[in-house]
């Protein structure tokens, strides 16, 4: 055995038994599942390096003897706690230890960030070979002589002939979808790259058309602007090396990357995907308020996020810095943990996140599954426990609620009262059901009428035409046979008909495909907005002209992608100024301690000492838990929310004096009314008795 390697192994054994600085990991913990053994874990760790930038990127170079000697020296000089953590993650695998501590270009930014949970590798340095091309765009991220030339300093190769770009759209061939996906998805990828400097990248999973459309709608309709913190939106199967179904997305400003995880979203309808993307992109918007785009090296190295413009903007809503946690946290010298969370912590209405967690647990024990609707959480505008873990999650959950409530309102304000009390109510109940099937400890209705809801509605404004289009794309596909059967049952009961016609099934088969057309046959969004009309008013020929009717099916797309992957394997080695808002915090008690009543259990938050030893994680994309709870179709979904906006009766809400008038929302729901009416024709109608002396049918 080489002398240096033997010494390294001895150091690892000694340091594993040595006490060091206390370190408590953040709350991003894997769900219960099969524990991987050391050898299997090492294979998974290496596999994560195969898609750390994009699918089938080359593996990092094998450590040289010189690098191993440097590693030996660094381990000897590092704090024992870090050595022990690395030993726990990678055992005695010297190659993985070298990768985890590597800084290829010696710029002070480590190549990778390491998951503290089973050692998955994530991107660290944006350009680890220091050739001017970001790793994601670099066809050879470990070779500074290959990958292209960037002439304008944005990290994207742009000099013709310096990189592979068959169609000349500026997207390197290893990322370009033009040969692997339908024309529509390839056009969206190119348009996002052109308009927002955002590239869609597949890593260990595939983008679905629904996810791509949700990203496009989120950026174009909700945010309307380029974000300095968002350059890559990637898709992976899961966040951790473990069976992990709790994480939907993760936003990391240091690498300007948002990652969406598909395993936890399997079967999720487009409406859920839209809400998730709004939540996660809002993290990019928040972080952009304090992001220095002129000093990417400093931002790339950043571990701590002190109070700044964004957190200061939330003080009027009840968020404040816990002054006792303002000291900087621990800086890792040997490796960079991916989920490292920072000081300071924040208080909401005078109580810390752990205190609010205890309060919610007590409320849930007392009130049961409907605790969010049977507690002061309603009057305080709290949409769920996860929203109170940090100012960032609160703002993101509130923005998601703002979007959902505006879509809900688009249906609830339909001028036909009969419609509102039947199909409209059922469809809104279906909307709530699918959202809470994904995030059961989340209720967007509680946000209605709050000051943050009003501010978000102004800051992230949606026009009536945009709301109409979103209703058509994301709510109408929720129409399903059980919902329509219930509506028809109510209608037939009112008509005195005991049994529905057999023609119902045939009618449903014909019409259910139409209910999903807005997502599959997607017209040009902005052309429709300018024309003031919705997708349901276009003929099939016009839709086809938009380039959508020709999109290949999933099977053809899969075959094209597989062929492209095979070819790749063969050729590839190894807060701006805010709008005017309420200046005061919503009226409510200032502590969760007084809200539960005598039956509550657990210490009152204002009497509990703050726990200051832990670190708080943010941005992991956990928007609530996974439980069950279904609304009743007859429920008033916005009752009890204290909606001051509805009571004000302003023109903005009621549509007076605007293009919306009496038809803006009507067009959005006409398809459901039409669907309902056509299905209703299948119900046998009572025959009026013929009066004596009158001709039949008179």
Image: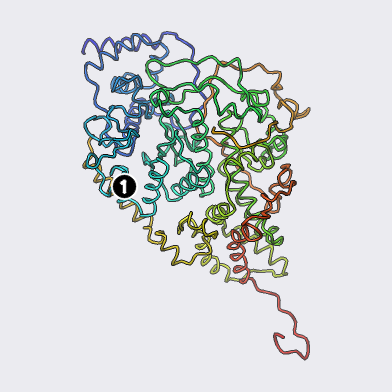
Identify the image's colour scheme: rainbow, by chain, secondary structure or one colour. rainbow
**Which residue occupies 75% across, 85% down?**
690
Q: Which of 23 and 382 is in front in this view?
A: 382
> Residue at (42%, 39%) from the top-left corner?
233
User: Of residues 410 and 605, which is closer to you in this image?
Assistant: 410
Q: Mark 1 points at which residue?
A: 169
Q: Residue at x 37, y 16 (%)?
A: 334
The answer to which quarter of the image holds residue 479 is bottom right
Place of residue 288 in the rendered image (x, y in percent of width and height, measured from the top left): 49, 32
Residue 293 in the image, given as x and y percentages of width and height: 42, 29
Q: Quadrant of residue 656?
A: bottom right
Which image quarter holds the C terminus?
Answer: bottom right
Q: Where is residue 499 in the image (x, y as percent from the top left)?
A: 66, 69
430 above or below 674? Answer: above
Residue closer to the observer: 205 or 94: 205
Q: Assign a secondary structure to mark 1.
A: loop
Q: How many labels does the image show?
A: 1
Position of residue 532 in the picture relative to residue 409 (left or right): left
Q: Which of 305 and 73 is in front in this view?
A: 305
Relative to 554, does residue 175 appear above or below in the rendering?
above
- Please indicate whether residue 63 sits to the left or right of residue 206 in the image: left
* Relative side of 618 to 560, left or right: right
Q: Would you say residue 49 is visible in this rendering?
A: yes
Residue 122 in picture, x, y percent from top left? 38, 29
107 left or right of 23 in image: left
Name of the residue lying farthest toward the bottom: 693
Q: In which quarter of the image is the N terminus?
A: top left
């Amino acid at each position: 055995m080489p002398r240096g390697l033997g010494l390294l192994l001895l150091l690892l054994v000694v340091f594993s038994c040595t006490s060091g600085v206390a370190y408590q990991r953040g709350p991003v913990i894997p769900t219960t599942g099969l524990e991987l053994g050391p050898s299997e874990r090492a294979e998974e760790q290496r596999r994560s390096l195969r898609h750390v930038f994009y699918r089938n990127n080359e593996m990092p170079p094998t450590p040289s003897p010189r690098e191993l000697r440097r590693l030996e020296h660094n381990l000897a000089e590092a704090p024992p706690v870090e050595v022990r953590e690395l030993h726990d993650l990678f055992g005695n695998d010297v190659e993985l230890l070298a990768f985890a501590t590597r800084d290829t270009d010696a710029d002070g930014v480590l190549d990778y960030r390491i998951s503290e949970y089973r050692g998955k590798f994530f991107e660290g340095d944006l350009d680890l070979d220091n050739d001017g091309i970001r790793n994601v765009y670099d066809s050879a991220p470990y070779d500074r002589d290959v990958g292209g030339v960037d002439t304008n300093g944005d990290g994207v190769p742009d000099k013709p002939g310096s990189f592979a770009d068959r169609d000349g759209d500026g997207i390197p061939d290893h990322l370009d979808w033009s040969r692997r996906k339908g024309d529509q998805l390839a056009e969206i990828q190119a348009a996002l790259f052109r308009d927002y400097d955002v590239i869609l990248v597949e890593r260990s999973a595939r983008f679905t058309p629904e996810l791509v459309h949700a990203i496009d709608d989120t950026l174009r309709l909700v945010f309307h602007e380029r974000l300095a913190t968002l350059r890559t939106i990637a898709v992976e199967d899961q966040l951790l090396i473990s069976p992990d179904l709790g994480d939907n997305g993760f936003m990391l400003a240091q690498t300007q990357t948002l990652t969406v995880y598909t395993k936890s979203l399997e079967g999720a309808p487009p409406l859920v995907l839209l809400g998730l993307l709004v939540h996660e992109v809002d993290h990019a918007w928040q972080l952009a308020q304090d992001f220095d785009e002129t000093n990417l090296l400093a931002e790339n190295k950043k571990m701590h996020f002190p109070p700044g413009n964004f957190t200061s903007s939330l003080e009027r809503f009840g968020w404040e810095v816990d002054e006792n946690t303002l000291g900087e946290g621990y800086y890792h010298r040997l490796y960079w943990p991916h989920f490292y969370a920072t000081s300071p912590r924040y208080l909401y209405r005078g109580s810390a996140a752990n205190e609010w967690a205890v309060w919610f647990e007590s409320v849930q024990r007392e009130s049961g599954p409907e605790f969010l609707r049977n507690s002061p959480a309603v009057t305080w505008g709290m949409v769920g426990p996860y929203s109170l873990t940090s100012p960032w999650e609160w703002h993101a959950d509130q923005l998601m609620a703002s979007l959902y409530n505006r879509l809900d309102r688009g249906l609830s304000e339909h001028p036909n009262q009969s419609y509102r009390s039947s199909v409209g109510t059922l469809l809104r109940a279906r909307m709530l059901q699918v959202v809470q099937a994904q995030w059961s400890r989340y209720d967007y209705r509680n946000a209605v009428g709050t000051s943050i809801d009003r501010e978000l509605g102004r800051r992230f404004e949606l026009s009536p035409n945009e709301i109409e289009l979103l209703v058509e794309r994301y709510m109408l596909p929720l129409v399903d046979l059980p919902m329509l059967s219930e509506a028809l049952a109510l209608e037939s009961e009112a008509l005195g008909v005991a049994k529905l016609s057999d023609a119902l099934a045939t009618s449903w088969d014909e019409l259910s495909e139409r209910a999903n057309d807005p997502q599959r046959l997607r017209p040009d969004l902005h052309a429709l907005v300018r024309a003031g009309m919705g997708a349901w008013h276009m003929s099939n020929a016009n839709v086809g002209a938009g380039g959508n009717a020709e999109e290949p099916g999933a099977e053809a797309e899969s075959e094209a992608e597989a062929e492209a992957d095979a070819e790749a394997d063969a050729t590839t080695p190894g807060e701006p100024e805010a709008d005017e808002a309420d200046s005061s915090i919503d009226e409510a008690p200032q502590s969760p301690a007084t809200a539960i009543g005598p039956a509550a259990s657990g210490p009152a938050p204002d009497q509990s000492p703050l726990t200051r030893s832990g670190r708080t994680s943010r941005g992991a994309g956990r928007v609530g838990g996974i439980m069950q709870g279904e609304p009743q179709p007859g429920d008033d979904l916005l009752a009890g929310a204290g909606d001051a906006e509805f009571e004000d009766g302003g023109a903005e809400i009621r549509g007076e004096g605007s293009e919306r008038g009496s038809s803006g929302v009507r067009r959005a729901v006409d398809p459901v009314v039409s669907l309902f009416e056509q299905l209703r024709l299948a119900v046998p109608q009572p025959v009026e008795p013929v009066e004596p002396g009158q001709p039949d049918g008179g």
